[in-house]
Amino acid sequence: MNYQESFISYLQFEKRSSSHTVTAYKNDLDQFSQYCAEVVGEFNVYTTDSKIVRGWIVRLMECGLNPASVNRKITSLKSFFRYLQKQKIIAENPAVSVPLPKLRKKLPGFVEENRLNQLLDNDFFNDDFIGTRDKLIITLLYGAGIRLSELTGLKDSDIDIKLTQIKVLGKRNKERIIPYPVPVSSLLEEYWRKRRSLFGTNSERLLLTEKGKPVYAKLVYRVVNRELGKVTLLEKKSPHVLRHTYATHLLNNGADLNAVKELLGHSNLAATQIYTHTTFKKVYEIYKQAHPRG
């Protein structure tokens, strides 16, 4: 019996995994099978042990594969052998105890303050409804640090112009109130005025397409990518980069880490601490300027 084919069928028809996932698992298992054939003559599920799995990891690393890709391949192996365990074909999973290569922490990219100021303070946006909406998208993502899903879910009633606050529904349906920069209020008023002239007063969502429908994720991605492309050479120009930028700029300007955690809606401080790497350079510069012996 071909256990690999059986496992792939299980992923397709019982787990209902995506075609991308199924293809990735199949490729990983085929590569491991080929490695076993080279090293021990065949891929035998009964005799494969942790030593063979470790040898494959070493081979992958020597070939220059990054740790994240190696970890994903080992995850494929673990899932395969776990499936065989459930089928009572093998007793132990040889991939479980194998130490995985450490992942390199990918530091979040961010846009420099002067670059964003250049985008928002100059005439980069058209003066029509679409231009005003696009500027509002950038301004809210950067000015409030909200997630893409939080932005697209905003309703008019979530905005408090007097208190310059917005209410968002975050992960796990957790509601939070976030202040936004005072100038955003005038931009909101301008946007509402133009929206009313086109679509009237009734609106399910704050941000609409040119056809009067709620904006969607791909549209926001396109807007952010296009507009940030005017002022930065960052490879990744996404809504989440503006969230990273929001947090980084707050910390660079002296905001308390716990306060930033609450503003971002993080459940623990560890998720927020990734942004502190970007502030060290700023702290070092201040030290050099301020310390008598700096």
Image (cartoon, helix red, strand yellow):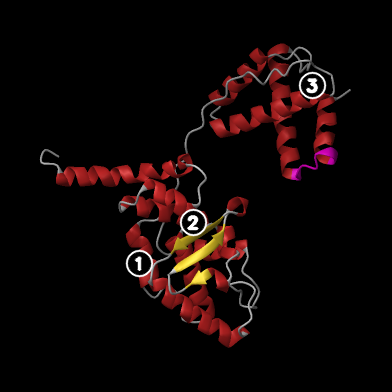
Q: Nearer the viewer, residue 102 or 42?
A: 102
Asked whether 146 falls inside the magenta stretch, the response is no
Q: Residue at x 38, y 71 (%)?
A: 182
Q: Nearer the viewer, residue 167 or 142?
A: 167
- SS at mark 3? helix
Distance (Cα) linking label 3 and label 2: 44 Å
Q: List x then y, in percent, for residue 216.
A: 63, 65
Question: Residue lying farthest right?
Answer: 1
Question: Residue lying farthest left?
Answer: 292
Task: Identify the mark nearer the N-term, 3 or 2.
Answer: 3
Distance (Cα) linking label 1 and label 2: 16 Å
Residue on which disc 3 sits? 85
Above-or-below relation of 80 to 172: above
Instruction: Give residue 237's mark.
Output: 2
At label 1, the amino acid type is Gln
Q: List x then y, in percent, for residue 65.
A: 56, 31
Say whether residue 81 is left or right of residue 221. Answer: right
Distance (Cα) linking label 1 and label 3: 59 Å
Question: Residue lying farthest bottom?
Answer: 197
Asked whether 15 falls inside the magenta stretch, the response is yes
Q: Residue at x 75, y 25 (%)?
A: 82
User: What's drawn in magenta, residue-wise?
Assistant: 13-19
Residue 175: quadrant of the picture: bottom right
- SS at mark 2? loop
Instruction: Give residue 118's mark.
Output: 1
At label 3, the amino acid type is Gln
